[in-house]
Amino acid sequence: MDSTLSLFPLGWQHYLLGGLFIGAGVALLFVFTGLVGGMSSVFSSTWSYLLRQPYFQQARYTGSRGWRLVYAAGLVLGALLWWLGFSDGTPLTTEVPVWALLVGGFLVGYGARLGNGCTSGHGICGLGSLQWPSLLAVLTFMATAFITANLAAGWMV
Amino acid sequence: MSSAPKMTLGQFLAVLAGGALFGFGLALSTMVRPEVVLSFLRFQDFGLILVMGGAVVVTLLAYLLLPRLLGQPLLGGYFHQHVAHWNRDTLVGSALFGVGWGLCGVCPGPAIAGLGTGNWSLLWALAGIALGALVQGLRAKA
């Protein structure tokens, strides 16, 4: 019990239940439409509406940009339902400084698109498809994230 | 569906509902809070393992069983497959992704979903991700 407490100081049930909901969302998308729902592609596919460069005009982006935007809208809607129905209604905030959100976000966007996947694309859909390149991708980003987060802990706040 | 950008109403609703379950899960599991993600990356709270594990198990069962049980998706089309390749781009991209994630505690799903919880600071992360994806695409050879 003590070790459980120290591994999960805020409890563990909401983590597992939340994860099952995430999996259910990916499964629902798949059973109805056959689509594989990673999240980072929407950032490239949406640029295809504005930019004529050949990279953005690839069929994998122009052919998926519609449903990917709807999927992203669903993401906001689902979080909104949680906020309205299951939280105390106070807007969430973060203490992470703006520069870290912006610079970190830039690397997240650049890296996820270069590496063709993020925590959901490689982490959930890739591992769920038993793709070993995705496992290597997950191990790679976990390793650099552990190092960065612990180094940054000293001078962040 | 990838060749036909126009969606039927049924497909629209299925995609929206799938996204909503995903977003609800991200909020319920507090993955929309960068502080919780960072506390995992600093070995203070291992909840993220349960989130990912729970999501992967359900996804694995769906991807494994549904194509065997059904000939095609309920609304038509075909069952797509996630195909990943291991090459230099995947290695470098994933490494950079991890550096960014470790810096801000925000990845693409929570950056989007977090807006539904009124956390407007995440717009900075969202802008960063969109810019990163833009620069990657402009630098890439199609």
Image (cartoon, coloured by chain):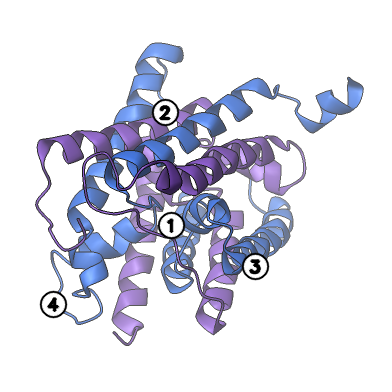
Chain colours: A blue, B purple
In space, the residues marked 2 and 3 are separated at their CA atoms by: 28 Å
The residue to which callout 1 is attached is: A102
In space, the residues marked 4 and 2 are separated at their CA atoms by: 35 Å
In space, the residues marked 4 and 1 are separated at their CA atoms by: 26 Å
Image disc number at residue A52: 4
In space, the residues marked 3 and 4 are separated at their CA atoms by: 33 Å
In space, the residues marked 2 and 1 are separated at their CA atoms by: 25 Å
Image disc number at residue A136: 3
Image disc number at residue B93: none
Of residue B1 and residue A108, the one placed in the foreground of this image is B1
The residue to which callout 2 is attached is: B24
Residue beneath the point at 53% across and 75% down: B90
Q: Amino acid at mark 4?
A: Arg
Secondary-structure class at tag 4 = loop
Measuring from the top left, give residue B8's x and y in whole percent.
Answer: 10, 42
Residue mark closest to the camera, 4 vs 1: 4
Q: Amino acid at mark 3?
A: Leu
Of residue A16 and residue A30, the one placed in the foreground of this image is A30
Q: Are marks 4 and 1 in contact (CB under 8 Å)?
A: no
